[in-house]
Image (cartoon, rainbow, N blue to C red):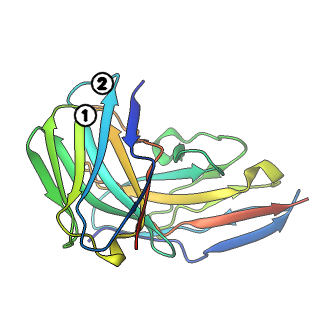
Amino acid sequence: SQTIHQWPATLVQPVGSPLSLECTVEGTSNPNLYWYRQAAGRGLQLLFYSVGIGQISSEVPQNLSASRPQDRQFILSSKKLLLSDSGFYLCACKQGSGNTIYFGEGSWLTVV
Amino acid sequence: AQRVTQPEKLLSVFKGAPVELKCNYSYSGSPELFWYVQYSRQRLQLLLRHISRESIKGFTADLNKGETSFHLKKPFAQEEDSAMYYCALRGYDTDKLIFGTGTRLQVFP
């Protein structure tokens, strides 16, 4: 079964600084990859998803971007963080033919 | 557009009481519905999906297309059921999984 690694687990960054959250997947090939944000009172919001290398779909306009440089690597970035970017970010993956989405342990981002 | 609504942010019950976590959805076609659960200090994980028609940890959920609902039910709640529960939807022609805002279930002894 798939294993998802996210890092860093916790991050405190000042406003205006850049961001890079990394997600890697083991145990599958050519997965669909997702970035979700879990913010208080707003549940799980889909930010980006990718069906292959270099293929990124953005779900909501925002200050963040995503990239997929390798099949099992998904990166969430920002050039300049805003206070509103604070939240819990979850990476998820789904094997192309499967029905189940698996989640990573998440990364806590606090923008101060 | 796909939308999932969980009207209750918090549901508190005593051990042994019945539980129903509500979920309504909006989708023009035939969706797949899921319930995910996040226990304290654990990662989000799949609880059950409607196509399996299974009971997991005593929980069941029936897809009601007429009412566009997928409520999660358990006849007798246990303390270990305390967690955050998310209802999710995936359209038949997409791999996007859309979540509701979640309901926190607290089961008191």
Badge 1 crowding class, 10 Å Cα cut-off, few under 14, some 14 to 19, many 20 or more, is: many
Residue at the image position 39 percent from the left and 46 percent from the top: A8
Chain at tag 1: A
Badge 2 crowding class, 10 Å Cα cut-off, few under 14, some 14 to 19, many 20 or more, is: some
In terms of depth relative to the viewer, which is nearer, A90 or A57? A90
Q: Relative to A67, is A43 above or below?
A: below
In terms of depth relative to the viewer, which is nearer, A5 or B101? A5
- The circle on residue A28 is 2
Secondary structure under tag 1 reads loop
Residue B93 visible, this orientation: no
Q: Relative to B101, is B73 above or below?
A: above
Q: What is the spatial separation of the Cα atoms under label 1 and label 2, in whole angstroms?
A: 7 Å
In terms of depth relative to the viewer, which is nearer, B16 or B67? B16
* CB-based contact (under 8 Å), mark 1 and mark 2: yes
Quarter residue A101 falls in: top left
Which image quadrant: the C terminus of chain A? Answer: bottom left
Furthest-left residue in this view: A54
Residue at the image position 59 percent from the left and 45 percent from the top: B42
Chain at tag 2: A
Q: Read off the residue under disc 1.
A: A31
Residue at the image position 81 percent from the left and 67 percent from the top: B13
Amino acid type at mark 2: Thr
Q: Relative to B20, is A21 above or below?
A: above
Residue B108 in percent (x, y) is at: 86, 62
Furthest-right residue in this view: B109
Residue A34 in percent (x, y) is at: 29, 49
Quarter residue B82 falls in: bottom right
Secondary structure under tag 2 reads loop
Which image quadrant: the N terminus of chain A? Answer: top left
Same chain check for tags 1 and 2: yes
